[in-house]
Image (cartoon, grey):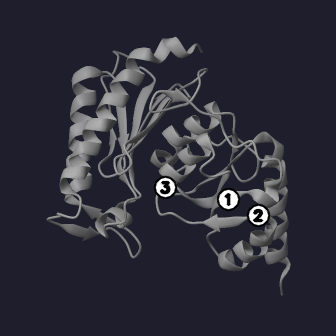
Amino acid sequence: MSASKWTDELAFATDLARRAGAVLTSHYERLERISYKSKRDVVTNADYASERLIIGEIRDRFGDDAILAEESGQHAGMTRADGTGNGRTWVIDPLDGTVNYANGIPFYCVSIGLVVGERPVVGVVFDPARDDLYAATAGGRTTLNGTAVRASAKEALSDYVVSLAVIGRGGLLRERRIAPRIRIHRRMGSAALALAYVANGRFDAFVQNGGLSLWDVAAAGLIAECAGATVTALDGGPWWQPATKGASNSVVAAPPAQHSALLELLASQRTTVQSRP
């Protein structure tokens, strides 16, 4: 696919992400309502306001396209006479990092991706707090605020700063065993923004072994990949798996020189935990 094929969609998503970001900024530290989605997650009036804007604009501009949104779920586009769609779905997270946002921690983002067929082809992640906009199209280069960027060029894994979230049974123990092999690890509270950070080396790598939904990775995975990172699932398979349900995706994103080493290290930690009596 040529990058130019998606110029209009990229321009649309870029403008829309900035407008949605302005909505979030206008509500920041002035929230009217915080609801509890689960023990560890919340939703705010800002989430809903941002999502309404994004969905409304997509329906006006690309009315035949389907939409998958975090807060409101699946929205079908126009269907053909045979009942099929046009194969295009916008995958959006109107506010990734809601807990950070609700607590006044300025690490959150708007994520907008376009999936055509079985692959993301447009990805935009906007950080309103820093006014940083990451963007990419399939077959093109990743940009940060219009300037092309590349993933980390560090040669040694021991120099890596990694966004690391090993969840599930024994997760903290496994993180402690991985930690000595890297410089340091962080868990930031917005998977989409942390994954986008791989595109320009703010994070040398991103690792999360589950707990990711399609809207967490649709845009940011493409952004990291188009910046030269190798992006896979934890087992080394494709990072984009649209058939998965719920928050069950995993992602490992790193420069090619160290991606395999990270996969091997993670596999060895899984084996160690599983073999314990």
Looking at the image, which is closer to me, 131 or 65?
131
Q: Which residue is mark 2?
A: 182
Q: Amino acid at mark 3?
A: Gly
Looking at the image, which is closer to me, 231 or 179?
179
Q: Which residue is mark 3?
A: 246
Q: Secondary structure at mark 1?
A: strand
Residue located 33% across and 62% down the image: 101
Left or right relative to 181: residue 166? left
Looking at the image, which is closer to me, 120 or 274?
120
Q: Amino acid at mark 1?
A: Val
Q: Secondary structure at mark 3?
A: loop
Tell me if I can see residue 234 in this picture: yes
Location of the C terminus (image quadrant):
bottom right
Left or right relative to 120: residue 96? left
Going by the picture, which residue comes out furthest to the left?
32
CB atoms of marks 3 and 1 within 8 Å: no
Q: Which residue is mark 1?
A: 161
